[in-house]
Amino acid sequence: MRILLIEDEKKVARFISKGLTEESYAVDIAYDGEEGAFLAEINEYDLIILDIMLPKKNGFEVIKQLRGKGLITPVIMLTAKDDLNSKIQGLDLGADDYITKPFAFSELMARIRAIIRRRYEKIDNKLQFGDLIVDPITRRVTRGDKEIDLTNKEYALIEYFVRNPNRVLSRTMISEHVWDYQFDPMTNVIDVYVNYLRQKIDKGFDKKLIHTVRGAGYVLRE
C-alpha cells in the first residue's frame, strides 16, 4: 500500500517513513502543504498522514482542498495541536482520525490498520484469490495448506496483486504502489521481485497465478 506523509519536521518525517517502510508500505514525503496537496491530487494513495502546522498551506487548508475536489483517500491528522477545537475542525473537514504528538509509533500503526480494515473489509478481514489467502493485518500469506514466507517488499507486491486481481498491472503502476516516486524505472528490480514471488507462490502448484502480459506488465489470474 502507498502512503503520502505530509510533515515539515524532517526528523519526524524520516522516523515515520522508516517505520512505515519496515512495515511494507511505500511512502512519499511532502514537506509543505502545497506540495502535499499536489502529490495527493496527481497520485493514487491508500492513506494520507497530514500535519496541521505546515509551511505554505496548513493541514486544514489541505484537507479542505482535497475533500472539495472529491478525493476520498483516508486521512490521519498527526499534529502537536491537541486542543479540542482543532480536533473537531479536523474531523469536520473530513479527517478519518486525529492523533496528537508526541505519539507512539505502535499507536499510529494500530490506527492505520483500523482504517485499512474499514476501507477493505472482507470476510475475516482477509483477501483471497483462488487458494491464495493474504491477511493484511498479520501479513500472513498462504496458498492451499502451504504457508509462504515473504520479505517485506515481496509481501507488499503480492498484496497489491491480490487487491487488483485480473487487472494488468504495468511496471509503472507497481513501482508507484510498492516502491515510491523516487524509484528508478530503468532498473529491472520489479521483474526480479515478480520472479521471487513466482518461485514462492507458484512453484509446486499446477495452476500458476502470476502471469506476464508481454509489453504491458503482469496480472494475477487463474
Image: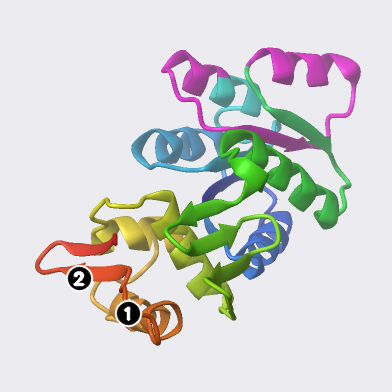
Direction left: furthest residue = 215
Quarter occupied by the C terminus = bottom left
Question: Do the residues bearing badges 2 and 1 touch, measured as CB atoms within 8 Å?
Answer: no
Q: Please state the extent of the stretch shown in magenta in the rendering.
A: 64-93
Q: Position of residue 80 (x, y in %)?
A: 83, 36
Is 78 colored magenta in this rendering?
yes
Residues 135 and 129: in front is 129
Residue 203 in sight = yes
- Report the residue marked by disc 2: 212
Q: Position of residue 77 (x, y in %)?
A: 71, 33
Task: Tell me if residue 142 comes above or below residue 16 in the rendering.
Answer: below
Give me the residue at 30% from left, 55% from top.
173
Does 38 appear in magenta? no
SS assignment at label 1: loop
- Please rate how many residues cluster around mark 2, counting C-alpha atoms within 10 Å: few if below 14, some from 14 to 19, many from 20: some
- The amino acid type, in three-letter code, at marker 2 is Thr
Q: CA distance from mark 2 to mark 1?
A: 17 Å
Which of the two labelled residues, at mark 2 and mark 1, occupies the earlier sequence position? 1
Q: Quadrant of residue 100?
A: top right
Residue 89 position by quadrant:
top right
Residue 214 position within the rendered picture, expressed as x and y whole percent measured from the top left: 10, 69
Q: Callout 1 environment at 10 Å: few (<14), some (14 to 19), or many (20+)?
A: few
Q: Which residue is mark 1?
A: 206
Compared across the picture, whether 211 is left or right of 71 comes to: left
